[in-house]
Image (cartoon, grey):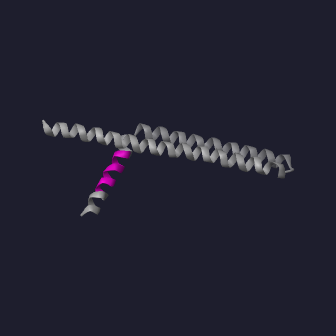
Amino acid sequence: MEARLAERTDARTLEARIHQMHQRDRWGAIAFVVALWVVVLFALVTMWPLIENGTIKTVLTIAAALVLSFNTAAIAAMLRHYHDDKSFIYGLDIMHLDEMRRRKRR
């Protein structure tokens, strides 16, 4: 009986740790995407008055749009994958982190 109770408590603790790690990674990825958009748009707006050739402006606009759209889509796909497999991904990380902590204590 006590072993089952301990297993349930460990499972809840593990799920809480998995959720916490997933949320931290999720916010980091979102912050990266926001920073990417800010930097690319800032660079485009800053350089815009210095470029006189309309063709170059068009190429830069298309390139910036492609970089932003592909990177945003890739991060969104990564977040979906992490959400779907978070128990496996983060459970494995937590197992290795706990083992490293145990070895350091010795």
The x, y position of residue 80, in whole percent, is 48, 37
Taking the image as shown, residue 63 lies to the left or right of residue 78, namely: right
Q: Residue at x 87, y 50 (%)?
A: 52
- Residue 13 is inside the magenta segment: no
Please name the residue shown 59% across and 41% down the image: 72
Looking at the image, how many numbered discs can be counted on the residues?
0
Q: Is residue 35 left or right of residue 91?
A: right
Residue 4: image x %, image y %? 17, 37
* Quarter location, residue 19: top left
On the image, the x and y values in percent for residue 64 come to: 70, 46
Instruction: Indicate yes or no whether the magenta region holds residue 98.
Output: yes
Q: Quadrant of residue 83?
A: top left
Provide the residue span drawn in magenta: 90-99
Which image quadrant: the C terminus? bottom left
The residue depicted at 27 percent of the width and 39 percent of the height is: 11
Image check: 12 left or right of 36?
Answer: left
Magenta span: predominant SS is helix
Where, quadrant-wise, is the N terminus in this rendering? top left
Please report the residue visible at 61 percent of the width from the left and 43 percent of the height from the top. Answer: 70
* Image-based side of 57 in relation to 78, left or right: right
Foreground residue, 57 or 7?
7
Q: Quadrant of residue 102?
A: bottom left
Q: Specify the farthest residue to the left.
A: 1
Q: Residue furthest front?
A: 105
